[in-house]
Image: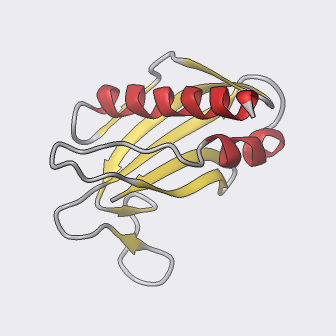
Amino acid sequence: MMRKLVASLTVAAAIVIGAAACGGSGSSSETGQKIEIAAGSLAIEEVELAERFPPGCDPGPGCDQAKPGYRVLVVWLKALEGEAADVSGDLFEASNGVYVVGASGTRTQRYLGGLWEGRLVVVKAG
């Protein structure tokens, strides 16, 4: 139980660092922050605030739009040890219960956590 809590808090810190690195809009890359989860070490590769997921997709099937007035926080990660697929399940578990609170008091929910098209990602939406 304690290990899951530590992993969750570590992923929470990564999301907050990612949101801060993004500066409120656009994207940021290579924050240099190292994240430890049970399956190994990760680094934040890129952070994006987007109106849809995946970012830049054409509206339609397979492209999910954020609610009006909201954005989607996308934190792309890279495995520093081993393969992305080896840590994706642990990342999913570690991101469970992690959220960001917006200025309006709105709390995000995990939309996706794990492997997306070969890349590790945690996605938060309002």
Whether residue 84 is visible: no
| Quadrant of residue 78 within the rendered picture | top right
Q: Position of residue 60 (x, y in %)?
A: 40, 83
Q: Residue at x 57, y 46 (%)?
A: 121
Relative to 11, residue 91 above or below: below
Q: Residue at x 48, y 41 (%)?
A: 75
Residue placed most toward the observer, 82 or 109:
109
Q: Residue at x 23, y 30 (%)?
A: 23
Coloring basis for residues: secondary structure
Judge left or right: residue 102 versus residue 10: left
Relative to 62, residue 98 above or below: above
Relative to 66, residue 122 above or below: above
Q: Position of residue 112 (x, y in %)?
A: 56, 57
Residue placed most toward the observer, 122 or 13:
13
Q: Quadrant of the N terminus?
A: top right
Q: Residue at x 30, y 32 (%)?
A: 22
Q: Quadrant of the C terminus?
A: bottom left
